[in-house]
Image (cartoon, coloured by chain):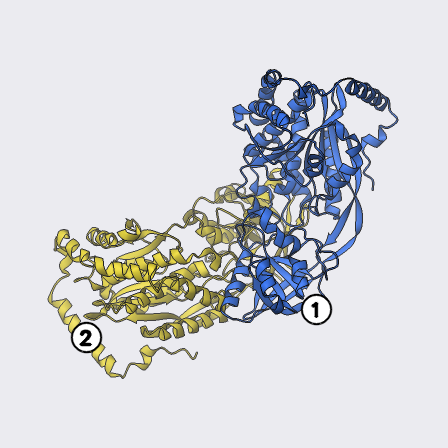
Chain colours: A blue, B yellow
Amino acid sequence: MPMIGNKSRGHNSTSQALRTLLILCCLLQCHSRPHSYDSKPLSEISREVSKYSDIAQQIINLAVYGKAQKRSYERLAEFTDTIGNRVSGSKNLDLAIKYMYNALRQDGLENVHLEPVKIPHWVRGEESAVMLLPRIHTLAILGLGSSVGTPPAGIEAEVIVVDSFEELKKRASEAKGKIVVYNQPFVSYGETVAYRASGASEAAKVGAVASLIRSVTPFSINSPHTGWQWYEPGVVQIPTACITIEDAQMMARMARRGQRIVVRLTMAAQTLPDVDSFNTVAEITGSEHPEQVVLLSGHLDSWDVGQGAMDDGGGVAISWEALSVIRDLGLRPKRTLRTVLWSAEEPGGVGAAQYFQQHKANISNFDLVMESDLGTFSPLGLQFTGSDKARAIMKEVMKLLAAINVTSLEEHGEGTDINMWMKAGVPGASLHTADQRYFWFHHSDGDTMSVQNPEEMNLCSAVWAVVAYVVADLEEMLPR
Amino acid sequence: MPMIGNKSRGHNSTSQALRTLLILCCLLQCHSRPHSYDSKPLSEISREVSKYSDIAQQIINLAVYGKAQKRSYERLAEFTDTIGNRVSGSKNLDLAIKYMYNALRQDGLENVHLEPVKIPHWVRGEESAVMLLPRIHTLAILGLGSSVGTPPAGIEAEVIVVDSFEELKKRASEAKGKIVVYNQPFVSYGETVAYRASGASEAAKVGAVASLIRSVTPFSINSPHTGWQWYEPGVVQIPTACITIEDAQMMARMARRGQRIVVRLTMAAQTLPDVDSFNTVAEITGSEHPEQVVLLSGHLDSWDVGQGAMDDGGGVAISWEALSVIRDLGLRPKRTLRTVLWSAEEPGGVGAAQYFQQHKANISNFDLVMESDLGTFSPLGLQFTGSDKARAIMKEVMKLLAAINVTSLEEHGEGTDINMWMKAGVPGASLHTADQRYFWFHHSDGDTMSVQNPEEMNLCSAVWAVVAYVVADLEEMLPR
């Protein structure tokens, strides 16, 4: 592929030599003293953080009220309108990476480069499902990522409708040769997604020939919501797709009435060999500890429906915008700000996992890892994972956002693409926004720019920039 | 068609002779005295109405808390699950009429019969739209009812995006040979539906070759919302369809960026000759003034998407249920309660217009016309059209519903299928429910049983039954 970043091209340059020198100096410095925040009283750190109130206000003024306002929205709109959706392995994802690489360079960010990864290449192909009995009705479906296809003529079989895995187990003897329809209620994404993730293998274990899950969403306008699924090793792989809440509920009513339901499912889905892709990186290099990193991120791939504007175009846009705002203000923190736009999050954080493997040797230099992948609606605060001391410091940082009323620091930051770092002890933060409707659009054709709001994105960008800049500029890294 | 009601078959029977006699007696009685409510003080009428509080409570108890609860929901679910949607002129509408005729008879209602009407027969056919420039993107569309089709290869043309009719007029010179995309904002259904109703003719007047309207809804998950449209006589008929909010907004953004947009629209839509259909009628015959009528109604046809469970399955179900509840309680009001399930409301109240022509000679015997076609969600009250005195009486009637907190009597009852009666002076009432989301599902694949709630339908049925029964049983007809 023709995408080669200036990181590679810069290897032999003077700037590279300078960077190496800086890194060496810093390594010496690091070895010469412990992380002093471990012993420093919070009152002192609090005083240090509070000195950033002017800078925080400058960032807010520029991002929310100044000439940068609406920029993240406009960038995202132009990006998603131009590229459309971009599923792992697709030509569109290649185009998206190229687009973003060029855009980050044109924006004048530093060290813009691509880091190679291998990613899954699952293709949906033609797919359809028709209920043949008790009456003919076309089902709106989306095959689930990694599903095998059906024979070309499809699979025609009687349906068994269950509300839960427990019911399936109880009625296991009825499932052989049938299509299992899961009509599981939506409890929460975290809980209910189990039906999408492992519904096919659980159905296969009791002899089913295919499975259809009710889309994992609390609300629907007959909208199917796709997503990745995982076959359990050693279990027969059967085709699986999502159907709508409406159709799942209708089939459940029919089954309760004792009606025989027959569905024909046809899917041309197939998994092709993994393909080459890239995590896309841009930086503002740190002035004093360039080897130390505050990482901001979102994922560039999406599902192959809608525009991927929410999942995760918004996270991409604000992780770019934060750097632009800091650069516009002529700021350069002590540590490096690094924006990473992950490849192939949807198949299970594939690009990020390889990034972790590629960079984990350097883990002691990762100060804070940040991810926005839960929507860029009106920001509420950060979900944070870290030590008590680190949390206490982050609470001080959040106070800098009082002017836009985003001071909440919640428990349990999590995110597919940063979990590995957090598990290994690096403090992590996820953006938490007023995302009541997030799963209404998630992985559906409704994930478009129409769900984004420029003012809300301004606020998210401000939060992202203030937190990243201040943490990257403090005297010390966050304690672990 | 094999559907012949017991009205026809009863023409030579003894009961028919008895009915004729009753009608003659009543006609004499009517001529012998004026409507005494015109002169009777409200306090007296109020006392009369308040005597129905026990009966109202019996109705509420049965419909909301007793063995009839959930019946309207279950009936509607079985009906719509069995038949599916039923657009004017379709075989499904025939099946629906047959189904309902049989169901009303099996329910033991009186004078169940079908009254012939002629209705439009528009067929959608295969349809699709693809944006070819600036990138290839499939548009989710639904052709609008009565639209002509395109040539088989489709119409491929550049797009002009406008936000309003005013903008179209200003930019008329740009529209020639193009596809007009209306990206009108949703203000209210009443106001915004003008773009659906006459967008095609307005576009044709400035030389456009087709028109696409942004769906008339305040909310979307990339969902197109169809509906009838009307060609202006003497104006070239061009094909027209709705697109989603998301796609209309995207094309508007692209146009603002100066991008050239090209769309290919392919529609096999055609209008076939009108077909025979029926309004479906069931009654509880009045004990004293059987020729006088309180009419309850909903329409049996729907759009050819979703299940038509909300528009207007709910109205049908509660207009049936109200009679069942009254019959279950062994009640028989002085006047006749007549449920009419209209045919072909969606093409513009076609079945109801013919009913008016067929029955208007008898208009003086129409006491109150009721229509439920705005959803059967949690009931708020009635929208009422009538004289001040009639309104004052209706307010007293509504007090009987205090136990379920549905006492509101609002201004301006309206409804496609009862407007002609109201314009001719007959008091009219429409059910008003908490319908904030009505237009989210309206005329889309989201109009299914999943939007219905059994408890809410219980309440609607109770309102419908109490109002209809009490008005039909008062000493006098409502004053005009």
State whether residue B423 appears in this view: no
Q: Is residue A234 above or below residue B161?
A: below
Which image quadrant for residue A79?
Answer: top right
Disc 1 residue type (three-letter): Ala
What number of labels is visible? 2
Give the chain of mark 2: B
**Cα gap from disc 1 to disc 2, whole angstroms:** 66 Å
* A388, B391: nearer the viewer: A388
Query: Which residue in the structure is indicated by mark 2?
Result: B22
Question: Which image quarter is the C terminus of chain B in?
Answer: bottom left
Q: Nearer the viewer, mark 1 or mark 2?
A: 1
Q: Is residue B467 above or below residue A56?
A: below
Q: Helix, strand or loop at disc 1?
A: loop
Measuring from the top left, give residue A297's x and y in whole percent: 68, 35
Q: Is residue A415 above or below residue B75?
A: above
Which image quadrant for residue B298?
Answer: bottom left
Residue at 71%, 37% (x, y): give it.
A341
Which image quadrant for residue A301?
Answer: top right
Residue at 53%, 48% (x, y): give it.
B220
Query: Which mark, by number, is residue A153?
Result: 1
Q: Helix, strand or loop at disc 2?
A: helix
Residue at 56%, 42% (x, y): give it.
A451
* Residue farthest to the right, as pictured: A12
Q: Is residue A132 above or below residue B50?
A: below
Question: Which image quarter is the N terminus of chain B in?
Answer: bottom left
